[in-house]
Image: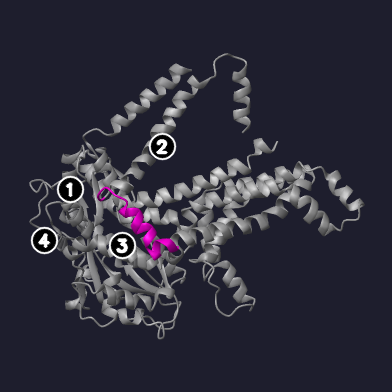
Amino acid sequence: MKYQIAIALFSAALGFAGSATAEDVVFTSWGGTTQDAQKAYWADAFAASTSINVTQDGPTDYGKLKAMVEAGNVTWDVVDVEGDYAVQAGKAGLLEKLDFSVIDKSNLDPRFVTDYSVGSFYYSFVIGCNKDAVEACPKNWADLFDTQKFPGKRTFYKWSAPGVIEAALLADGVPADKLYPLDLDRAFKKLDTIKADIIWWDSGAQSQQLLASAEAPFGSFWNGRLTALAATGVTVETSWENNITAADALVVPKGTKNKEAAMKFIAAATSDKAQAQFATATGYAPINLEADALMDAELRKTLPDMQEAPQVNADMAYWAAHRDEIGTRWYAWQAK
Amino acid sequence: MALSATASTGSSGTKDSGFGYLVPALLLVAIFFILPVLMLLLRSVLEPEPGLQNYATLLGSTTYLKVFLNTFIVAGVVTVISIVVGYPVAWLLAIMPERWSRLVLAIIILSMWTNLLARTYAWMVLLQRTGLINKTLMGLGLIDAPLPLVNNLVGVTIGMTYIMLPFVILPLMGVIRSIDPAILRAAALCGATRLQCFLRVLLPLSLPGIASGALMVFVMSLGYFVTPALLGGTSNMMLAELVAQFVQSLVNWGMGGAAALVLLVVTLALYAVQLKYFNPNRAR
């Protein structure tokens, strides 16, 4: 009996060691329809062409990432994180420098390239509305913050990140080019006016569920989640007026044992073809500037970076510098 | 309880106290449970710099105090409602014919075995503004606008009470079953009304079951995470959510550790109360 247990443990340990060989990458992202597309067009294609196996994990968790790096036991090799976090974590020493001899950055959108990160995909916070559930849909941020004209619940992203603060300031009449530095007092005062009518979404899937069930018939959404929802037959109206853009980033946690393979995976994921296919499937914009040529021209026009409506670029450097301060205040305000 | 009883009778026959056999298990607990908790707690006095500033921030802010207060309110309300709803069920189970009580018990236990997330999401679907309950009530013309049943205290209370009920029903059922029915008959023969029978005989005799069930539910509720996170709103956050927020979203482990320690101290204090006053071994 004892022997059996020992053998079982031993073989389990072997299996564990075996799964962590050099030619193996663990990719972590946020789950849902977005990670499905990342798996299909980045990971599976990469595995097929290189024989490096890609294992999916998730959701991304900054606490976990920090714990792994500090403990020296990094099990995530490539992680999809928010752009401002990538900048901050790079400065905090939690990330490996990217190897730009493997990753070709000449075609990557330079706004999202740092020593420690490259863009993953490019998205917008837009105003989404379930047309069947309401008489009129809000057209801009001021409408979304107007509970007289548009009574009922509205939904916003729960976590502290670029997007909601900007939306509040835009709704309060701050011109788009005067947003930064963010006037937090003014933003929270504006948010106070609709606080009782906000239902927070904490995951993309939840935002889709809230809108589809009309639990919250309108709100602020990641544009790709609306594209995915519309594809399931829900009558979604999207307003791109002053859509607020941000990008996710791909990073490599410091101390990964599969650094080389991780760099290769990032190179493949940011290639024109992988980016074009991912964008086609999700409605997010590619961060590889050559991807356009590989995409259907009509579809390309619907993506965040091709909208004719005015657009606001969230200032990632500002957010990276003030992430902790804004976050602390944000959660304290929510709990009030 | 039963396990420790057999273990002690088993080892009493030999000279060896049996402690040596416990070492592997104790090591496991120490390495995987006690050590990580200690490390997190250490961070609360070491990060970002040594000192008690994390505790000062935590206890000095009205926002965080509100979270503490809210945690106790939710735990208290859930405990009271669990007892009020669970008591009749336990009573019924105790006096039902056995084959029926077994069936009802199986239903209760089966619900305990069902995945917590699935059960909580089910409540979300039922309680939301466009959910079954609101749609039915509106269809019947009983209400004009949907009742706010979720993303607030109401939702948390309903969801958590549902999850905690078995923890009240099971100990209560045991205690009520052990009460000799002849005592109730004697009370009735002496002229006590039904209400008097309940209030002056059954209730006092089942008090130990109420107390241990209540304390268990209260302590479990204090540290509950999933249900409040899904069915509650941000303005009635509980302590466990605050800890998760510090650790995951703000990556401020000093504050996370401090909040966790406060939760741990309160829980251990309540556990000490339970051991001192409601220890079933002592009552016997």
- Residue A110 on image: x %, y %: 11, 61
For the residues marked 1 and 2, what is the alpha-carbon distance in whole angstroms? Answer: 29 Å
Residue at (73, 48) in percent of width and height:
B206
Vertically, is A41 above or below A260?
below
Specify which label sits upstream in the sequence, 3 or 4: 4
The amino acid beneath tag 1 is Gly
The residue closer to the viewer here, A21 or B254, is: B254
Q: Chain under label 4? A: A
**Chief secondary structure of the magenta span?**
helix
Q: Which residues are magenta?
A: B48-66
Residue at mark 4: A110
Specify which label sits upstream in the sequence, 1 or 4: 1
Residue at mark 1: A93
Residue at mark 2: B34
Residue at mark 3: A328
> Can residue A294 be seen here?
yes
Considering every residue shown, the one lying at the far bottom of the view is: A149
For the residues marked 1 and 4, what is the alpha-carbon distance in whole angstroms? Answer: 22 Å
The residue closer to the viewer here, B46 or A179, is: B46
Residue at (34, 68) in percent of width and height:
A226
- Residue B116 on image: x %, y %: 52, 50
Q: Nearer the viewer, mark 3 or mark 4?
A: 3
Q: Nearer the viewer, mark 1 or mark 2?
A: 2
